Image (spheres, helix red, strand yellow):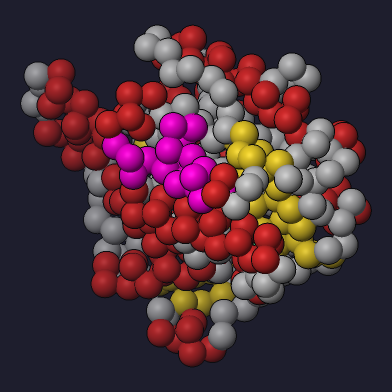
Amino acid sequence: MKVLAILYDGGVAAEQESRLLGTVENKLGIKEWLESQGHELIGKLTQPPSHVEWQLNILQYSKEGPDSDFQKHLVDAEVLITTPFHPGYLTRELVEKAKNLKICITAGVGSDHIDLNAAVDHRIQVLEVSGSNVVSVAEHVVMSILLLVRNFVPAHEMIERGDWVVSDIARNAFDLEGKVVGTIGAGRIGYRVLQRLLPFDCKELLYYDYAPLPAAAAESVKARRVEDLKDFVSQCDVVTVNCPLHEGTRGLVNAELLKHFKKGAWLVNTARGAICDKDDVAAALASGQLSGYAGDVWNVQPAPKDHVLRTAKNPLGGGNGMVPHYSGTTLDAQARYANGTKQILENYLTGKPQEAGNIIVGIGKYESKAYGQR
Ligand code: NAI
């Protein structure tokens, strides 16, 4: 049986830090375990070069295109392990070539890099390690909200430059207290964001989700559900996106919706880049319709060097809190999703039932209700 794992080159960092488990070097900690059971694990075979630009090109090449390690090994792999951080994009075309493929395991949370409808049609199961990094992301969301609202990044950049002009920063710095914050998606992460925001004494916490929170859960975070998306965003000072990427959320935050945001609102997206239209977000920042955009997810990963959201700014030259995709891959999270991946594999190999919450696509059907209303 062939298990194919598409991981990323961790380079020197992964050699020095064995807890960087999601890397080619450290192989989720499962290589020895699998081999002891007589299975073969094919990691993605790229060398960590010293020059970063070359590394990015090689990485993109090696998981993209017919000669990539990914596509060469996919044709006879039975198990595919991918991570959302450096995704091997499994399109319908590739699903059709992967004749032996039975199960895709996402080491982490978020399986939109797999064509889930194609997986349903081809009776390929898709599982993820649900819950493994939800606290990690929720913490990052709260940090991102604060750094935008308080205008932190330009303040720090000013210090590094050697300048000290407090008014330039303070003219666009606010308190989170008294603001209205809303989450699109109130699942594991969205709910944890609301929990963590509670002590900030926001004016109101709102959520937009087709699945209402249980009454006791909504009460415990004092969150109010708004059923219409335009109505929802028009009430928020801060919008945070915490829903999966699927047919119903791709491009959801676009120019049309951004018109309904409060002028100067802040937007945080740690869910998936393609939920927010990158050009429309950049234009909204440039016009001041948005005061800030922050997050760690990009419509293509790794993001190209000239990606518009690397440098998009508000009219005062701030408002950008973008980082590479790492909010859900802290060392704590990596330990959890590596263990979870191993557990899913072990269940698969020994015929044990999988944990229900981990199953996105079962055999021939969606099991998760989070990937759109069907
Ligand atoms: P979850 O499945 O617990 O919750 C998702 C929620 O979104 C559900 O309540 C669902 O009903 C709701 N939803 C789905 N479509 C919606 C729509 N059109 N409008 C409003 N709500 C909608 O998932 P969890 O664990 O909270 O994760 C959410 C997403 O966050 C993942 O699918 C993934 O894309 C992203 N994520 C990002 C990470 C990172 O490192 N940046 C790490 C982990 C997850």
Residue 281: percent from the left, percent from the top? Answer: 55, 35
Q: Specify whether residue 347 is painted magenta.
A: no
Picture residue at 74% right of the left edge, 17% below the top: 67
Quarter-of-image position of residue 242: bottom right
Front residue of this view, candidates 77 and 147: 77
Task: Say if 268 sits above or below 44 in the image.
Answer: below
Picture residue at 42% right of the left edge, 68% below the top: 192
Q: Specify whether residue 31 is painted magenta.
A: yes
Is residue 150 something one can see in this rendering? yes
Quick check: 190 left or right of 110? left
Task: Give the position of the N terminus as an image quadrant.
Answer: top right
Picture residue at 34% right of the left edge, 48% below the top: 331
**Magenta segment, principal secondary structure?**
loop
Front residue of this view, candidates 239 and 221: 221
Is residue 92 something one can see in this rendering? no
Residue 187: percent from the left, percent from the top? Answer: 55, 68
Front residue of this view, candidates 164 and 23: 23
Task: Say if 199 sits above or below 286 in the image.
Answer: below
Task: Give the position of the C terminus as an image quadrant.
Answer: bottom right
Quarter-of-image position of residue 254: top right
**Can you name the residue that lies furthest to the bottom here?**
216
Which segment is the magenta one?
17-34
Residue 47: percent from the left, percent from the top? Answer: 48, 17
